[in-house]
């Protein structure tokens, strides 16, 4: 029987800002952005927030059966060997140019994206940390963004502030980004794609990176401003690629995780806790995720989506605070004994009979019988009997 | 009071044994040089080219563009405004480093690179980045990561002007800085991955060059300056020290057109020392 499992499984960072992933290297390989969809391969995407599953320590990771392939370049090379080659029709010179432009995008352009996301204080605190918090579990979301920021600071340490042609002080990384945008614009010209009428690997990589640069949803969208005002041709290219990719087959649905069962909680409490945390995380993501894909060149629509999302979050926290207050009140009242809950019948015992030691009960004649250290019985005639004599009566 | 006066006299007599002599300053910078000065990392003895790739690329760029300048040796990276050599002291008194040197050349020599079309300019800019990232990583791996190469090749370059113990400490600090740079750009240092990238870059350059004189025709461009710097450093640095071996050099030797290209530029532009 032929297996229905798709041959490729891609592990990549999750969605953000209306895109399938916030990591451009994952997007270069993934759907909606690229190589796997453009090459019409059969594949499934599994969201992951743990780069340590990859042998190289970075996502994306492609699993072909039991073979793990890590890194964007290695994944694309592997897919080409399997027959999914977008560059089959390119000449050797075009292949060399493609490798050059891909390297240019993944070095200088990627540095400008890192600067925008991590070094810009507003973007980092209001956008980047929020995106990573949605992807990571409860503990890691508090330290992983800072670890990544430290690495980015080291990577971008060589860039300085300098004067541009208008004698304004700007960071060198944005001057480099403008040069790269200009080079891409010149290379693209009036063509549909970089090398004619068919998309190639360069289109997959360029779209993945440029779509993140063109984000209007950031608090300080500097790269979006540069692209929109100076390079409308590239904005049109991004929109064109976005529309074109909808014509390609989507990924197969990823396998759903097994539902939580009481046996699993007892046998594997830590795993059950992780599953619960994942469910809460998914609920939170559903409440706060962007429902519509990123639309370039329509800031009003993006602002409306952002306001809707913020309203949903505000309502959620309002109800959570009410429930929290009620729960606290009930817990306080019960814990301090102000309200008690009892179960079973409550018999009214005569407290005047508490001169006897022990427990009071009634015999068949209705007279009190004491089950204690001493026993005295008085009948109707006033005769007094001690323990044992009442039974003879 | 007499006791204080006697103590002061004794102190004055003691300090008079160590008179202060004011000597002339060792070096007074010129206000504005008559000709622009390019400060590069140390050149080899009687050599014309710097031993560092960034400095050599700047030398090549200024020569190709015909920018009037003189070259001086310097071994202090902190002299540069960017913290890395080279830097260019212009006739207007500005100290320029990094991309400012390229912008200065393009502004002062507008004819440089003007023969290229817009798509060729884009290709030239893109292909330069291959050397600046992939070949640079390969060079750092061969020169600094390998303990044997770093001891026999890199350390002598950074210690020959220094007294002991600086000649033992400074090269090791430099090595740590280069390794740190590599780890900031790659999560892991994988030899196979680095050498694969070097192969991809050199193959692209070999295809772009083909049998032409320069990468984009008969005139050199910025891309040629960058490529020549890396080829020359890789081909010449590991040619002398016994026991050193460069994997990147072996890959370059497989592309005969690149080797001839490096020799041609060396013979045409760098045969005479420029002071």
Image: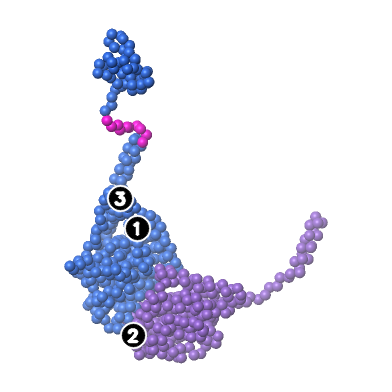
Chain colours: A blue, B purple
Same-chain status of marks 1 and 3: yes
Residue A286 in the image, given as x and y percentages of width and height: 26, 55
The residue lying at 30 percent from left, 16 percent from top is: A390
Q: If the image is split into quadrants, where does the C terminus of chain B sit? A: bottom right
Q: Which numbered tag is attached to residue B207? A: 2
Of the residues under marks 1 and 3, which one precedes in the sequence?
A: 1
Q: How many marks?
A: 3
Q: Write down the chain letter for disc 2.
A: B
Residue B224 in the image, given as x and y percentages of width and height: 40, 84
Residue A120 in the image, given as x and y percentages of width and height: 39, 62
* SS label for mark 2: helix
Q: Residues within 10 Å of mark 1 (few under 14, many from 20)?
A: many
CB-based contact (under 8 Å), mark 2 and mark 3: no
CB-based contact (under 8 Å), mark 1 and mark 3: no
* SS label for mark 1: loop
The residue lying at 31 percent from left, 63 percent from top is: A13
The residue lying at 34 percent from left, 58 percent from top is: A136
Whole-Å distance between the Cαs marked 1 and 3? Answer: 22 Å
Q: Which numbered tag is attached to residue A265? A: 3
* SS label for mark 3: helix
Q: Residues within 10 Å of mark 3 (few under 14, many from 20)?
A: some
Which residue is denoted by mark 1 in the rendering?
A136
Whole-Å distance between the Cαs marked 2 and 3? Answer: 61 Å
Q: Extreme left residue here?
A: A1
Same-chain status of marks 2 and 3: no
Q: Magenta region: which residues?
A: A335-344
Q: Looking at this view, is A335 or A172 the one in front?
A: A335
Q: If the image is split into quadrants, where does the N terminus of chain B sit? A: bottom right
């Amino acid at each position: 029987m032929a297996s229905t499992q798709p041959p490729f499984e891609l592990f990549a960072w999750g969605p953000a800002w209306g895109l399938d992933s916030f990591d451009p290297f994952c997007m270069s390989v993934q759907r909606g952005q690229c190589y796997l969809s453009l090459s019409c391969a059969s594949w499934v995407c599994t969201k992951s927030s743990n780069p340590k599953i990859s042998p190289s320590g970075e996502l994306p990771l492609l699993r072909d059966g039991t073979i793990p392939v890590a890194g964007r370049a290695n994944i694309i090379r592997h897919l080409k060997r399997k027959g999914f080659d977008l560059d089959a029709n390119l000449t050797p010179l075009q292949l060399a140019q493609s490798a050059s432009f891909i390297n240019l995008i993944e070095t200088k352009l990627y540095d400008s994206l890192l600067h925008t996301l991590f070094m810009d204080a507003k973007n980092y605190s209001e956008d980047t940390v929020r995106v990573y918090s949605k992807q990571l579990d409860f503990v890691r979301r508090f330290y992983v963004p800072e670890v990544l920021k430290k690495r980015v600071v080291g990577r971008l340490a060589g860039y300085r502030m300098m004067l541009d042609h208008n004698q304004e002080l700007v960071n060198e990384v944005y001057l480099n980004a403008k040069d790269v945008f200009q080079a891409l614009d010149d290379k693209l010209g009036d063509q549909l794609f970089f090398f004619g009428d068919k998309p190639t690997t360069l289109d997959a990589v360029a779209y993945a990176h440029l779509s993140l640069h063109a984000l209007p949803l950031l608090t300080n969208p500097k790269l979006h401003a540069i692209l929109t005002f100076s390079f409308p041709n590239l904005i049109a290219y991004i929109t064109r690629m976005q529309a074109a990719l909808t014509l390609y087959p989507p990924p197969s649905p990823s396998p759903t995780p097994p539902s939580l069962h009481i046996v699993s909680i007892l046998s594997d409490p830590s795993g059950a806790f992780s599953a619960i945390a994942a469910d809460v995380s998914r609920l939170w993501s559903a409440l706060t995720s962007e429902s519509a894909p990123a639309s370039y060149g329509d800031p009003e629509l993006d602002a409306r989506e952002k306001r809707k999302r913020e309203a949903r979050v505000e309502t959620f926290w309002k109800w959570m605070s009410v429930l929290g207050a009620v729960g606290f009140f009930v817990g306080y009242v019960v814990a301090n004994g102000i309200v008690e809950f009892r179960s079973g019948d409550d018999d009214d015992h005569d407290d005047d009979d508490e001169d006897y030691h022990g427990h009071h009960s009634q015999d068949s004649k209705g007279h009190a019988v004491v089950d204690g250290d001493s026993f005295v019985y008085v009948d109707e005639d006033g005769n007094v009997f001690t323990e044992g004599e009442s039974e003879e009566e | 009071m007499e006791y204080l006066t006697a103590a002061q006299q004794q102190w004055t007599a003691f300090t008079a044994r160590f008179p202060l002599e004011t000597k002339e300053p060792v070096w007074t910078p010129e206000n504005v040089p008559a000709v622009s000065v390019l400060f590069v990392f140390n050149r080899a003895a009687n050599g014309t080219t710097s031993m560092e790739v960034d400095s050599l690329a700047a030398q090549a760029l200024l020569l190709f563009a015909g920018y009037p300048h003189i070259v001086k040796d310097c071994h202090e990276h902190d002299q540069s405004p960017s913290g890395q050599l080279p830097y260019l002291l212009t006739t207007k008194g500005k100290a320029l480093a990094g991309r400012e040197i390229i912008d200065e050349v393009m502004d002062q020599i507008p004819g440089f690179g003007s023969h290229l079309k817009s798509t060729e300019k884009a290709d030239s800019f893109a292909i330069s980045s291959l050397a600046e990232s992939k070949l640079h990583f390969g060079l750092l791996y061969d020169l600094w990561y390998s303990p044997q190469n770093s001891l026999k090749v890199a350390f002598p370059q950074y210690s020959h002007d220094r007294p002991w113990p600086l000649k033992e400490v400074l090269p090791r600090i430099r090595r740590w800085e280069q390794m740190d740079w590599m780890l900031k750009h790659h999560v892991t240092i994988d030899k196979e991955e680095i050498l694969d990238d070097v192969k991809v870059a050199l193959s692209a350059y070999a295809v772009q060059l083909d049998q032409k004189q320069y990468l984009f025709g008969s005139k050199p461009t910025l891309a040629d300056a960058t490529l020549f710097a890396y080829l020359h450093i890789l081909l010449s640095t590991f040619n002398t020290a016994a026991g050193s071996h460069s994997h990147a050099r072996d890959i370059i030797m497989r592309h005969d057109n690149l080797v001839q290209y490096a020799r041609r530029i060396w013979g045409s532009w760098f045969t005479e020392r420029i002071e």
